[in-house]
Image (cartoon, rainbow, N blue to C red):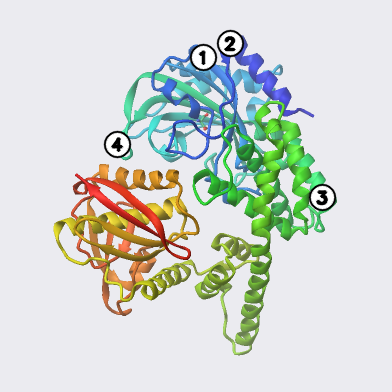
Amino acid sequence: MITDLDIKKKWFDFFTSHGFKRIDSASIIPENDATVLFTTAGMHPLVPYLLGEKHPAGNRLCDVQRCIRTNDIDEVGDDWHLTCFEMLGNWYLGSCPKDEMINLSFEFLTDKKYLGLDKSKLATTVFEGDKTAPRDEEAYAAWKSLGIERVFFLNKHENWWALGSGVGPCGPDSEMFLDTGKPLCNPDCNPSCDCGKYVEIWNDVFMQYKVKEVGKAAELLDNPNIDTGMGLERIVAILNGAKSVYDVGVFKDAIDFLSTKAKVDYTSNDRAKRSYRIIVDHIRAAVFVLGDKRGVVPSNVGQGYILRRFIRRSVNHARNIGLDTSNFDRLIDIFVDKHGVDYPDLAENRATIKEELFKEVEKFSKTLDEGRKEFDKVLISIEKHKEFAAKNGEKVENIISGKAAFRLFDTFGFPLEITKELASERGYTVDEADYNARFIEHQQKSRTAAAGTFKGGLADSSVESAKLHTATHLLHAALQKVLGQEAMQKGSNITPERLRFDFTCDHKMTPAEIKQTEDLVNEVIAKNIPVKCEEMTLDEAKKSGAIGVFEAKYSSKVKVYSIGDFSKEICGGPHANSTGELGHFKIVKEESSSSGVRRIKAVLEK
Ligand code: SER
């Protein structure tokens, strides 16, 4: 059995013997970086140094970084995906000796003293080139000279690395894969295929470029770098011949423990297996987030919202396998005992982790139980309908109507994402377009009830009012980003001096939420984005994801105003031509309007 500790030791032995300095893992919650919620890779905390600042430890570094990535959250539960993982990394700052790095990668992977992998089982990929950067002949030649037979040229989608925000250092990469021995799924099967033949193990990124602003072209970096990253859990699994990251180490311990408590066995079926895996992945992620020295608590915003999803999904999947959530207590101990050694903040915060996690579990459990019962009733009625239809030779699809999904949300507080998850487990889908349409209709109804006939909130059509009207759309979109979808418009009133906006929200907005909302609006203003108006049918508008008032009849056309991809609303106008005209947006008052409804007054300053 090769453990994660063995691999970490080999990693540091190897790289320090080649002159790389060991540095500590940074917090999982990034410092001074508003572009991303979590540290997603080892390079993340190093961005300033990758852009040219001097690192106190020198220009060759190595580490193990705790990371969270949520882009693959729906994949969690298969054999290889995790949201929370540790990444082994090493860097050259200010130089980019590709050949040397590829030689080091090869040595670490194949030398018996280190990973000892069979080189005939390795395959690698390199960048095929496009208008930004040339084909990476140098990396190709380096792999070939080491006797790697399978070196594939792939496109930018596969072999170009950049941060999720699209801004910052970036460049072509060369990825290393292990052939699992499965047959080729088709003659063109290569490492970009997800058939499972190839598992990615390491990525050497040649950071020769940087992007200064979203949408701008990549420019050459004066001092290029190399950034590499290897997922620790994956490599441990592979070296132990395991078929999944969940079959070894702390995940195996956690699943073994849950198996003694849950009513449904881990191996009884795929659905149960997936639930076990999601619980251990998500509770471990929650431990890392809650226990971090910059820890956050569950909320409807930012990291807090992701944390809330981790916990709520775990509670839902515990129900699937007949697991009492009180067992999360021991589960937390398993993770803290294991990781508190390398990350002492987790051990120090053990009590807080438990307290906050269980607060959220309690909050959600009741909603979940009632919602699940209602969900089951929905399925039973569809099944009955199917039987009935079958007798008449008709077929009914496995679709949960938007009406039913919306009722689960509106009456039982049951989140759409859980409805979708339960639906897909039973082979159903949800009519999301119809759900969204009902969501908007509901917004309109409550608004009409609260504010009489709603006329777009515009009392006159002066230039100043038009600007404030555009600002209102930005505010609405920003509130939904900061407070969540629940922040629905209840009413609006605009004069040439100020805007007034009422919306659903269960608490007084905190100063941080107010500031975040202002900042989001001002960012869009600073980008001077044109306000686009399109005419379409109401149905098309709904499908396009527009929010807004539905006064028109189904046949007639409505106007949809959009501001980049930040805001899209059905609305009569008029609006400013472009956000740059607005000036500086400022919230001057946030107060209660009625129960569960808050009111914002805001102005545009010159
Ligand atoms: N940043 C690269 C990655 O995440 C290598 O560390 O794959």
Kindly state the secondary structure of the residue where label 1 is placed: strand
Kindly state the secondary structure of the residue where label 4 is placed: loop
Going by the numbered disc 1, the residue's amino acid type is Arg
Of callouts 3 and 2, which one flags the residue occurring earlier in the amino acid sequence?
Answer: 2
Going by the numbered disc 3, the residue's amino acid type is Ser
Q: Which numbered mark, 2 or 4, is in the foreground of this view?
A: 4
Q: Are marks 1 and 2 in contact (CB under 8 Å)?
A: yes
Question: Alpha-carbon distance for marks 1 and 2?
Answer: 9 Å
Question: Alpha-carbon distance for marks 3 and 2?
Answer: 44 Å
Q: Are marks 3 and 4 in contact (CB under 8 Å)?
A: no
Whether residue 241 is visible to the viewer of this picture, yes or no, is no
Of callouts 3 and 4, which one flags the residue occurring earlier in the amino acid sequence?
Answer: 4
Residue marked by disc 2:
18
**Lateral position of residue 445 relative to residue 418, left or right:** left
Whether residue 547 is visible to the viewer of this picture, yes or no, is yes
Sort mark 4 into few (<14), some (14-19) or many (20+) by Cα contacts within 10 Å.
Answer: few
Sort mark 2 into few (<14), some (14-19) or many (20+) by Cα contacts within 10 Å.
Answer: few
Image quadrant containing the N terminus: top right
**Lateral position of residue 85 relative to residue 246, left or right:** left
Q: Residue furthest left?
A: 462
Residue marked by disc 3:
259
Q: Position of residue 476 (x, y in %)?
A: 36, 57
Residue marked by disc 1:
60
Question: Alpha-carbon distance for marks 1 and 3?
Answer: 44 Å
Residue marked by disc 4:
216
Q: Residue furthest right?
A: 260
Kindly state the secondary structure of the residue where label 3 is placed: helix
Question: Alpha-carbon distance for marks 1 and 4?
Answer: 30 Å
Of callouts 1 and 4, which one flags the residue occurring earlier in the amino acid sequence?
Answer: 1
